[in-house]
Image (spheres, rainbow, N blue to C red):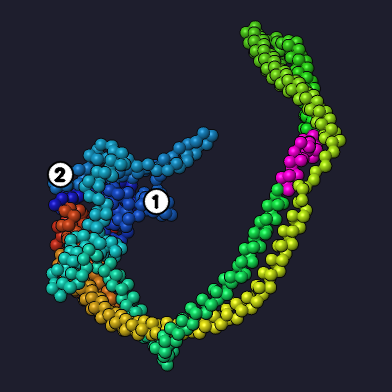
Amino acid sequence: MKNITINRLTLENFKCHSRLNLVFGGGNASIYGDNATGKTSIYDALTWLLFGKDSAGNGEKNMDIKPLDGSGQVKDHQAITSVEAELLVDGVGITLARTYREIWTTRRGSSEAAYEGNTSDYYVDGVPQKKNAFDAKIKELVPEDVFRLLTSVSYFASEMKWQDRRATLFDIAGTLSDKEIMASNSQFQPLLDSLGKLTLPEYKAKLLSQRKGFIGIRDDTPTRISECQKTLEGLQGLDFEAARELEKQLTRQQEEISMELIALENNGALADLQLKLREANLERDTLESKNRAYRDKQSAHVPNSRSMETVLRSEQNRLESLRLLITNVQGEIEHYRKEVAATRDEWIAVNGEAFAGGICPTCKQSLPFEQLQKATEAFETNKKQRLQKIMDNGNRLKERCEESEKRLADLMEEAAERENHIQELSAQLDAAKSTTVVISDMPDYARQLQTVQERIGSLQTSISSLMTDSAQEQDATRRQLEAVNDQLREARNVVAKESVQYWTMDRIENLRNEARNAAEALESIDKMLFLMEEFQRFKARFVEDGINSLFRMATFRLFREQVNGGLEERCDVVFNGVPYMGLNTGSKINVGIDIINTLSRHYGVTVPLFIDNAEAVTKLLDCNAQVIRLVVSEMDKELRVV
């Protein structure tokens, strides 16, 4: 186990101490002093040296480091605060030091110094260190969280969050898992067997979810059975055997009437007349088709004036579009020519410019030769660039003008061709309109057409009369078939209800079985949940006994039974049945020492233990660490170390 003690502690300008040198020699010590003589500041000095905080955990921004005057202001801003400690680590000395000073600077234009902040320096065995390296060295000796646990008798019991205190105790005790605790008692073997890979909370959540489902089945089953029984009551009095016999009779009637209707719809005489009508219509259509072909043959060599007029209008529209395009392109050419002329005038104007900047605009004297030469060269370079830019722009305009002129020539050539084509089409159309052709039907066409149309009319009259008589008979037969179908549907509906009766009876039996199974499952789940509650109580006693066995005085209440029978997780420190907050100061100190002894064994390190208000304890509990008692003594107006 690593043992850390204080051999010497020196304070300069720290809190109320201008200079204080304490020699402990690595052993226990008692520091006597009246109130406000700076006993606690010694403890603060050590924690500030190691971690930059006071013993209560406050950082530099929340603590007064330098000595103050009567009005609460810093006595001397130029004073340097320092704390130096010579520690013994397993008997080997190491010296740590930290300084703190204010930074004051005099700004330009001001005679007074201004406060710019603070700075600290760090030393290990007299060697300057960066803050990170210094902190790493301290952590190597003892981490801050462990130091706070081991150097304050009250921190673990009253200042630490109970959740963190509980986690630390479980870490120290190396508490067994739920399954390992179950295995220690055969009472919980059924629970252990049922858990499988699940944790206890997971298995409990699973059981509660299943229980909710089974309760739903148990509570809903009576209502469902009642609904099924109402369905059976509605089926009472139905004669299913008579309904099946009636169904057979009506089915035979349905088949007979359907066959009779099919015979009426397939009337032989009517079908023969309809066939002759189709043949007569085909004969008429064939005659008309032949006559059209005969007339088309006569007009095959006659020019189609309508088609020619359509083509002529299309050509005329295209010619108008071409003339519009020609006008637009001519406008473009005129525009480009003006732009080219303007560019040419601009080039002549720029080319005629001469350098006239040889006079200084400020003093109105001629520029020196070198400056004049540079100005002239810059002017000529700029002039050349401008001329080149104008020339490039003029060339682009010329190219566009030439492109437009070529396009204009193509459009005018196409317009001339269109005009010639329109003249040819107009002449052809006039010739076609002057041609007269007489087109006639084929010989004997009118007589043949009249004969076949008369035959068609006679057949249509005969079919209409025959269809009227047949339709009346078919309507009567269909009405008879519909009546039989209605009766058949009613009979089949009654027969179908027999299967509903059987299904409902089976459903009632299944619901009763589900209710019995749900009740059995609920009983099994409730037994397992009860066993879980018993295990929680057993675990509470098991864990508390295991942890409390590590301490001489302190005991820990890790669970508290609630009104509803459940267990609430806690971590209360108790001594002889009295909660820590109700103990007197002496008991609190000794309980704190007991806790620190156990924590030191767990972390493998002892550090100096400061006990404030030590006068309240007549006999301190034995401690493995160096103990420094801070004792209130009215007679000691200055600190006295024993």
Quadrant that contains the C terminus: bottom left
Q: Which mark is residue 202?
A: none
> Does 523 sit above or below residue 72?
below
Q: Are marks 2 and 1 in contact (CB under 8 Å)?
A: no
Whole-percent x, y for residue 32 in the image: 23, 59
Q: Main secondary structure of the magenta part?
A: helix
Q: Is residue 307 magenta?
A: yes
For mark 1, give the secondary structure. helix
Which kind of residue does numbered mark 2 sit on? Val
Residue 292, horizontal then vertical, whole percent: 73, 47
Q: Residue at x 53, y 77 (%)?
A: 260
**In the rendered image, which quarter is residue 544 located in?**
bottom left
The front one of 387 and 398 is: 398
Q: Seen from this angle, which residue lies furthest top?
A: 369
Q: Residue at x 45, y 37 (%)?
A: 105
| Residue holding disc 1 | 61
Q: Secondary structure at mark 2?
A: strand
Q: Which residue is painted at 80% across and 43% down in the image?
A: 439
Q: Is residue 517 above or below residue 91?
A: below
Query: Which mark identifies residue 92?
Result: 2
Numbered label tally: 2
Question: As rendered, which of 163 and 509 lies closer to the eye?
Answer: 509
Where does residue 303 sit, x and y in percent of width and height? 78, 36
Q: Which residues are magenta?
A: 291-312
Mark 1 residue type: Lys
Give the Cα distance between marks 2 and 1. 34 Å
Which residue sits at x=82%, y=31%?
428
Give coordinates of residue 271: x percent, y percent: 60, 67
